[in-house]
Each structure stands twice: as structure tokens, then as C-alpha cells.
């Protein structure tokens, strides 16, 4: 007897959702997604560690001690906040403090608020896009902070450095070279150029290092199993795609889906070969809405 055809709705069934954020964020997201009934699994595709080069370490020590010299400090991620404030940060000169603190999204802003409160700094000094912004990125941050930038102003970019295969991300170094330090990367290129165009000086501070994972045989088996039509990958960084693209032989991603938290990541996911790419804002509530609209649970 010929089996009956599967209902069309089965094409929307999600059997596996791979969370690629760095640990321990990945585990936190997996727990939250599973509580909502989604079949989430953690496979961190970026490892976060300490800066490696002597120049980076010395730069971090310098800016931890002299951060009040900056008129504004952009923390590019939650990892930048956590690693910068991990130890040895000088107390602020409250009476004469002029520094503003920039965060591209609410998650980074939340961690930044905790760090500033521990130093007795008013969290009203944080500038970040509103929670209803279309995206959380440099382009949506800029209108809020442009008036703070001008000739003689110093903007410090606290960021990570890529190691191993992650260093081949294809981002431009032009802005970093123009600013006298390696501070470029994706939307930061654009924001840096806006600051330079208004006469500001831009400096970079490497607070952490991003490295590719070392796949175990079980990890590789999971990667290849998750290239089928019932699998979706959650990407919050374009760099997380690089370890997948470095695999030999390369998996065929044409049947799998990518759920991405920014259009730029979506472009990279399409280039990697993912057959279906959906864009959502990065907040958990937005990711859950995107999942509900595109799939049903097993």
C-alpha cells in the first residue's frame, strides 16, 4: 500500500534549532527556548577569551585606567562590557565626568548599566536605541549620539579581536587605519566614518578575543545532521558562519534555514548557501515571534 502523502504543513515542522551564540549565552538561550517548547540545542560557534597580544593587553590596561579621557565609549557587545569591566577599572571622577556610554542594543545596555552602577555612575549617561527600534545597530544608534561628536572629541571603541578562521571575516580595515587603530567591523565601519567626518578622534580597545570552536566528531556529526529541511540555525553574528564554511567537505545548506538577527548576517547566510533566511530583531521575544510565524513545534 502506498503511504499517504505528508500534509503540506509538515514542511513547517521544526525538528532542531541550533543556537550558535558563545557560551554561556548559548545555554541561557537554549533553556529559554526549550521552556517555550522549541527543540533548541547549543553549538557555540564563537569562543570568547582574553586578549592575546602584548599590545592588546597593554591597551586594555591603559584604557581601564584612563577611560575618563574619552568623551564617549562605544561597547560593541555584552562581551565587550563584561571583559572591560572585569577587573582593574579606575573609579570615575564623578564631579568632572564627561564621558557618555554608547550601546548598540538593549542587551548590551543592560549589562552596561549594571557595570556603571557598581562604579556609582549614573546610568542616564547610557545612549542606546529604544526598544521599539527597527534594528539594534550602529546606524540606529548614530542619530542619538551624533550631537556628542565634533573636533577635539575622543570616541573609544571597546571591541573584540578575531583569531583563527574568524579573522577572515572580510570586514574592511580602512576605517581602523584612518582612525589610527584597528577598530573596524561591519556597522562600526560606518559609525567610525561618521565620527571622523565630524572631526573626532577614534581609538580602539580590544577587551576580548573571538576564536573559532574546535569541533569534536560529535559536533561535526550534529552540524551535518542539522543541514536538513527540519533544521534551523540561529545566528547573532556573521562570524559564527565562518567555522561552518571552513568545514571540508562543506555541508549542503540549501534545505536548512537560518534565523538571523540582522540583515547583514542574512546576506552572509545566503552566501553560505542557506536555502531559507529569516530576519528578526535579536530580543528573545522577537525570536519567539519569528519562530511561531515560520514553524510549528514537533
Image (cartoon, rainbow, N blue to C red):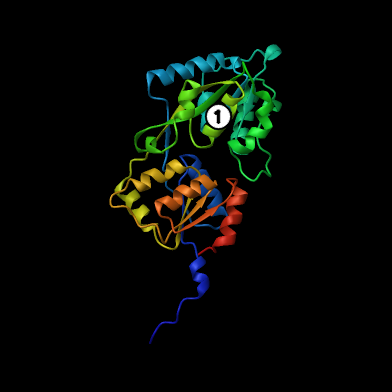
Q: Quadrant of residue 195?
A: top right
Residue appearing at x 33%, y 54% in the figure? 221
Q: Label 1 belongs to which residue?
A: 193
Q: Quadrant of the N terminus?
A: bottom left
Q: In the figure, 184 relative to 272: above or below?
A: above
Image coordinates for residue 142, horizontal then vertical, percent: 63, 33
Q: Quadrant of residue 105?
A: top right
Residue appearing at x 37%, y 48% in the figure? 244
What is the number of callouts on the image?
Answer: 1
How dense is the environment of label 1, judged by Cα within 10 Å: few (below 14), some, or many (20 and up)?
some
Image coordinates for residue 112, horizontal then vertical, percent: 61, 29
Observer-nearest of 271 and 100? 271
Residue 44 visible at all:
no
Residue appearing at x 53%, y 57% in the figure? 38
Horizontal relation, residue 138 to residue 47: left or right? right
Image coordinates for residue 119, horizontal then vertical, percent: 63, 20
Residue furthest out toward the front: 197
Q: Quadrant of residue 67?
A: top right
Observer-nearest of 127 and 287? 127
Observer-nearest of 30 and 157? 157
Residue appearing at x 50%, y 41% in the figure? 25
Residue furthest out toward the bottom: 1
Q: In the figure, 200 relative to 241: above or below?
A: above
Report helix, strand or loop for mark 1. helix
Residue 210 visible at all:
yes
Image coordinates for residue 83, horizontal then vertical, percent: 50, 27
Amino acid at each position: 500500500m502506498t503511504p499517504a502523502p505528508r500534509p503540506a504543513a509538515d514542511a513547517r515542522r521544526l525538528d532542531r534549532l541550533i543556537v550558535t551564540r558563545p557560551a554561556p549565552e548559548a545555554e541561557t538561550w537554549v533553556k529559554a527556548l526549550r521552556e517555550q517548547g522549541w527543540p533548541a540545542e547549543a553549538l557555540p560557534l564563537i569562543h570568547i577569551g582574553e586578549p592575546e597580544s602584548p599590545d592588546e593587553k597593554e591597551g586594555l590596561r591603559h584604557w581601564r585606567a584612563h577611560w575618563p579621557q574619552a568623551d564617549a565609549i562605544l561597547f560593541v557587545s555584552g562581551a565587550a562590557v563584561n571583559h572591560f569591566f572585569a577587573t582593574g577599572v579606575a573609579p570615575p571622577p564623578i564631579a568632572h565626568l564627561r564621558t557618555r556610554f554608547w550601546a548598540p542594543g538593549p542587551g548590551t545596555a543592560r549589562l552596561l548599566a549594571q557595570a556603571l552602577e557598581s562604579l556609582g555612575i549614573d546610568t542616564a549617561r547610557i545612549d542606546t536605541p529604544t526598544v521599539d527600534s527597527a534594528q539594534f545597530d550602529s546606524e540606529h544608534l548614530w542619530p542619538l549620539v551624533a550631537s556628542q561628536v565634533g573636533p577635539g572629541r575622543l570616541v573609544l571603541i571597546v571591541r573584540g579581536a578575531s583569531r583563527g578562521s574568524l579573522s577572515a571575516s572580510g570586514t574592511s580595515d580602512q576605517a581602523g587605519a584612518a582612525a589610527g587603530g584597528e577598530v573596524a567591523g561591519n556597522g562600526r565601519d560606518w559609525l567610525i566614518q561618521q565620527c571622523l567626518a565630524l572631526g573626532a578622534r577614534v581609538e580602539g580597545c580590544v577587551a576580548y578575543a573571538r576564536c573559532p570552536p574546535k569541533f569534536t566528531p560529535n559536533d561535526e556529526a550534529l552540524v551535518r545532521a542539522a543541514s536538513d529541511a527540519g533544521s534551523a540555525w540561529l545566528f547573532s553574528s556573521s562570524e559564527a558562519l565562518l567555522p561552518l564554511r571552513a568545514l571540508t567537505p562543506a555541508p549542503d545548506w540549501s534545505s536548512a534555514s537560518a534565523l538571523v538577527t540582522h540583515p547583514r548576517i542574512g546576506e552572509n547566510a545566503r552566501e553560505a548557501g542557506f536555502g531559507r533566511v529569516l530576519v528578526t530583531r535579536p530580543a528573545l521575544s522577537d525570536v519567539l515571534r519569528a519562530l511561531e510565524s515560520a514553524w510549528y513545534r514537533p
